[in-house]
Amino acid sequence: MEKNFARKVSTIEIEVKVENGRGYTNLKAYKACRLIPLDKNPGVRPFGVGEVLRRIVGKVILSVIKPEVMSSARKLQLCAGPAVGCEAAVHAI
């Protein structure tokens, strides 16, 4: 069920990109978040809180494409999911 849902969402995103021709401008509502000001001395720091649906969709898509991300990022990002990636980073120094 997760894979089917992720494919549907990916298809929708691809269709929006192709139809629009300018990228993600039609997905502004999907990517939007609520900004909450946090008091930091000195000043204020904005803290973005994403919508629940966006977070669920993102996690489902990532669960489906995780092997592809791991294989393509393995040489650049040692902490992108491979086992003992942090240890490999320490030994590489």
Image (tube, grey):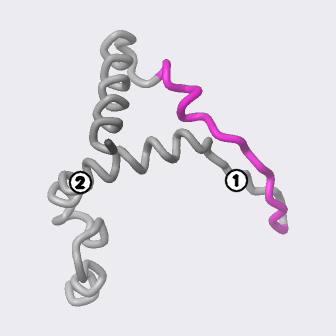
Q: In this view, does 80 lie to the left or right of 36?
A: left
Residue 40: horizontal and vertical position, in percent? 81, 65
Q: Which residue is drawn at 16% across and 65% down?
A: 75
**SS state under label 2:** helix
What number of labels is visible? 2
Residue 72 sits inside the magenta stretch: no
Report which residue position mark 2 lands on.
Answer: 69
Residue 59: horizontal and vertical position, in percent? 42, 50
Which amino acid type is marked by label 1?
A: Phe
**SS state under label 1:** strand
Q: Residue at x 29, y 65 (%)?
A: 80
User: Foreground residue, 67 or 77?
Assistant: 67
Which amino acid type is marked by label 2?
A: Val
Name which of mark 1 and mark 2 comes first in the sequence: 1
Up/down of 77 relative to 12, above or below: below
Residue lying furthest top: 19
Q: How crowded is mark 1: few (under 14 residues within 10 Å), some or many (20 or more)?
A: few
| Circle on res. 12 | none
CA gap between label 1 and label 2 equals 27 Å
Q: What span is colored magenta in the figure?
A: 25-41
Mark closer to the observer (1, 2): 2
Q: Residues within 10 Å of mark 2 (few under 14, many from 20)?
A: few
Report which residue position mark 1 lands on.
Answer: 47
Q: Is residue 87 left or right of residue 16?
A: left
Q: Quadrant of the N terminus?
A: top left
